[in-house]
Image: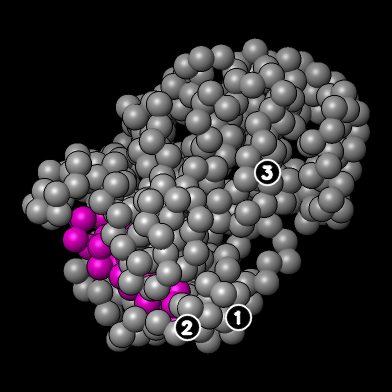
């Protein structure tokens, strides 16, 4: 088997993309951009309608890392400056960061979508092409037609706790646990119609949430690694007084943790009843200067305790826990109920991801590896990431062939499993949960 045969197969095989933050397509069609409140942080976010939409998220993070003041970076996206003026504002930082995975993926995206690479000469043309691309149905065109992605799991950042997409053939949904597990979730409480006074009322809100949304979800997703350490203590009885203090705004850290841990464990029980895998953010945090960053080195350690305590729950350890991927490998080898997802990995640490695939396949049964999630809010950027992931996967398999670990035919058999077959097994389609005995016993529609 030559590498061109392997490349062709990987190019023709569709990804099941297990992690995106895409907003609904209709929001991207607005001529003046899309402003929304990020559910888990309460922060206002903006997706511009010009070419700088391509920078939103990770590329912007690396411009800030290269020295662009954060406020200036975000302000630049928001203002009505001309496309060229925006390029001039970012260029020195952009060129400095150009070789990172974040910007490499951006270059691949514009090359694949428009046949162009961002520069002072092309930014106006790319701006026109970006606007022209955005018309009804363009998500399908970009994801299926260009990136060859069969479907995407979306963890919505603008609709809590789950976005029921207008494109259910293309987009699946994660049921988000943050802010639900924080003990105050005004939007969901209002939706449920349950007035919350005690923690028992709040548990009812959580049960209502699963009853209303679990059958529409492919997984539950918890990203509280952005807010706290992942260590979860057993809390045997409902922490009633801590919950009261939390609702009054007088809770200390101990109260908060006790309430959150208790609610999280309740959610794990429900996820298990509904046969929903639990996706956990592990490892590196996007952005800059996050208060929770110092905890990342303990994530894998903390998650091992959770895996130990919930043997019948499937856990999806996201982002290969980079930079602690070797420890994550040990954990996923040790616990049958854990799988690893390389979402985000091919752009945050491209060589670590390639190396990790080789280490994984030679250490852990291959059915426990999910190989791609773009992790983007903007569909355009998924294109570049999907391409980087294909190239990385190809190189990893070639490495294993070159060192006589597997045959070329073996690699050809493995590639489709890594690209979509494993995902199909780990995440049953949403209708499965809907028809489960639990769902009907609970009497939810
Ligand atoms: Zn994400």
Q: Which mark is residue 301?
A: none
The response on whether ligand 1 sits within 8 Å of label 2 is no
Q: Which mark is residue 45?
A: 3
Badge 3 local density, few (<14 within 10 Å), some, or many (20+)?
A: some
Which quadrant does the N terminus fall into? top left
State left or right for residue 89 relative to residue 380. right
Which label sits in the foreground, 2 or 3?
A: 2
Give the Cα distance between marks 2 and 3: 32 Å
The response on whether ligand 1 sits within 8 Å of label 1 is no
Query: In front: 343, or 357?
Result: 343
Residue plotted at (55% across, 56% down): 40
* Mark nearer the N terminus (2 vs 3): 3
Whether residue 268 appears in magenta in the rendering, the answer is yes
Chief secondary structure of the magenta span? Answer: helix
Badge 1 local density, few (<14 within 10 Å), some, or many (20+)?
A: few
| Residue pointed to by mark 2 | 242
Q: Could you tell me residue 393's position as x and y percent? A: 43, 46
State left or right for residue 248 relative to residue 422. right
**Range of residues picked out in magenta:** 258-280
| Residue pointed to by mark 1 | 250
Answer whether labels 2 and 3 touch (C-beta < 8 Å). Answer: no
Query: In front: 427, or 48?
Result: 48
């Amino acid at each position: 088997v030559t590498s061109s045969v392997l490349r062709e197969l990987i190019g023709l095989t569709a990804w099941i993309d297990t992690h995106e933050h895409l907003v609904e397509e209709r929001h991207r069609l607005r001529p003046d951009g899309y402003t929304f409140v990020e559910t888990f942080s309460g922060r206002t976010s903006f997706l511009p309608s010009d070419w700088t939409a391509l920078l939103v998220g990770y590329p912007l993070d690396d411009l800030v890392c290269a020295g662009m003041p954060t406020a200036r970076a975000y302000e630049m996206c928001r203002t009505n400056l001309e496309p060229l003026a925006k390029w001039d504002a970012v260029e020195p930082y952009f060129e400095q960061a150009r070789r990172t995975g974040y910007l490499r993926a951006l270059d691949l995206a514009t090359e694949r979508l428009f046949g162009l690479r961002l520069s002072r000469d092309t930014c106006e043309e790319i701006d026109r092409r970006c606007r022209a691309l955005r018309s009804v149905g363009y998500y399908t065109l970009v994801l299926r037609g260009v990136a060859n992605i069969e479907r995407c799991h979306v963890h919505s950042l603008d609709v809590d706790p789950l976005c029921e997409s207008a494109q259910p053939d293309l987009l699946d949904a994660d049921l988000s646990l943050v802010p639900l597990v924080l003990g105050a979730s005004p939007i969901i409480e209002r939706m449920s119609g349950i007035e919350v006074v005690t923690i028992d009322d709040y548990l009812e809100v959580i049960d209502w949430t699963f009853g209303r949304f679990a059958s529409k979800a492919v997984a539950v997703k918890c990203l509280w690694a952005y807010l706290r350490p992942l260590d979860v203590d057993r809390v045997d009885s409902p922490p009633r007084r801590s919950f009261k203090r939390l609702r009054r705004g007088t809770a200390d850290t101990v109260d908060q943790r006790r309430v959150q841990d208790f609610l999280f464990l309740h959610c794990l029980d429900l996820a298990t009843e509904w046969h929903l895998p639990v996706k956990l953010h592990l490892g590196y945090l996007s952005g800059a200067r996050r208060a929770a960053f110092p905890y990342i080195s303990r994530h894998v350690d903390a998650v091992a305790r959770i895996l130990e305590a919930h043997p019948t729950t499937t856990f999806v350890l996201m982002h290969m826990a980079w930079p602690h991927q070797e420890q994550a490998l040990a954990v996923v080898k040790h616990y049958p109920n854990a799988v690893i997802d390389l979402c985000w990995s091919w752009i945050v640490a491209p060589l670590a991801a390639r190396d990790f695939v080789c280490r994984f396949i030679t250490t852990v049964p291959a059915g426990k590896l999910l190989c791609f999630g773009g992790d983007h809010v903007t569909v355009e950027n998924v294109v570049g990431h999907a391409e980087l992931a294909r190239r990385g996967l190809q190189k990893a398999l070639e490495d294993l062939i070159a060192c006589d670990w597997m045959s070329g035919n073996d690699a050809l058999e493995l590639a489709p499993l890594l690209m979509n077959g494993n995902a199909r097994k780990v995440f049953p389609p949403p209708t499965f949960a809907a028809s489960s005995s639990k769902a009907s016993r609970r009497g939810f529609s």
